[in-house]
Image (cartoon, rainbow, N blue to C red):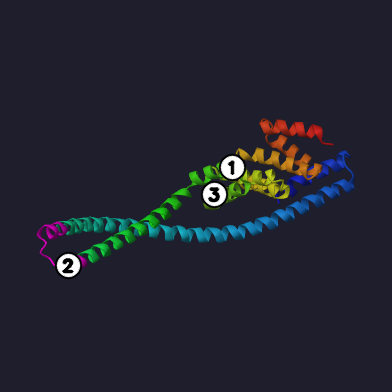
Amino acid sequence: MQMIKVAAPFLALLLFAGCASKNDLDSLKRDLDEMNSRQSKSERELSVVRNESREGMDKTLKDAQKELDGIRKGNADFQASLEAIKVDLQLLAGKVDDLSLQGKKPADDLALFKEDMERRLVALETKLQGLSKEQEAVQKQAAESPENLYQSGQEAFKAGEMKKARELFSRFAELYPKHAMAANAVYWIGESYYNEKSYDQAILEFQKVIKNYPDKEKVSSAMLKQGMAFISLNDTKSAKYIFKELVKQYPASEESKRAKDQLKGLK
């Protein structure tokens, strides 16, 4: 893994420079191996879930497109039927007026007319209810556009609803992995865990940003928060390593300045 490869020359440097004992180096290596193992396991589990979710979503989107096409056609047919019903109702209303004025039709005709009118109204209400449900489905699909999903995640995060924010950002990352804001979405998943003090899980999510989006601006932020999470776990060795890598890779960043401040306080 990337963390082990970067750690190897660092461990060698510490050994030759006499900055740490062999036991310290072995301990750090074991910590890194354990973290790498946990990360690999989480990534494998997430990969399985992501593949299953993506396949399900592809099928769902195709089905939704077919349903949308059917809705459009059904809506056109419904509009035509509605116009025809309006004409029929006007004709029927005219017949009522004629019957009222003339008073020549028997009561049975009026009863049949009323029954027919009620039947038509029930049919019209049923169609209107069906159209309303179809419109709700269309609105739900529109709500899952990348812009709406990301904005909803941000609003939930600002409101302190970490679980809801995590679900929205996770759905964004699954549906739109190539989107320009995908790295940000994964970063905010890590932040949601960090805010809940689930530091192990936060570290893994920040690592996904570092590994999967190396050219994105959020990488330096992810490294800084990853180091802070290690500090919260009392793993100062790993924290030092992360902060030094941050300073090395992004020396001009604001996160680098904060990493240097953190290094001064670590022993």
Query: How many neighbours does mark 1 have within 10 angstroms: few (below 14), some (14-19), or many (20 or more)?
Result: many
- Is 103 magenta? The answer is yes
| Secondary structure beneath label 3 | helix
Contact check, label 1 and label 2, Cβ < 8 Å: no
Residue with the mark numbered 1: 184
Report x, y in % for residue 145. 47, 48
Q: Residue at x 60, y 48 (%)?
A: 166
The amino acid marked with disc number 3 is: Phe
Dot in front, 1 or 2: 2
**In 3D space, how far apart are the residues under numbered discs 3 and 1 (Cα atoms)?**
10 Å
Dot in front, 3 or 2: 2
**Is residue 210 in view?**
no
Residue 111 or residue 24, whichever sits in front: 111
Magenta-drawn segment: 95-112
- Left or right of 97 in this view: 75: right
Query: How many neighbours does mark 2 have within 10 angstroms: few (below 14), some (14-19), or many (20 or more)?
Result: few
For marks 3 and 2 on the same chain, the one whose residue lies earlier in the sequence: 2
Magenta: main secondary structure? helix
Is 107 rendered above or below residue 223? Answer: below
The amino acid marked with disc number 2 is: Ala
Return the mark for residue 172: 3
Report x, y in % for residue 237. 81, 43
Is 158 rendered above or below residue 257? Answer: below
- Left or right of 239 in this view: 18: right
Residue with the mark numbered 2: 107
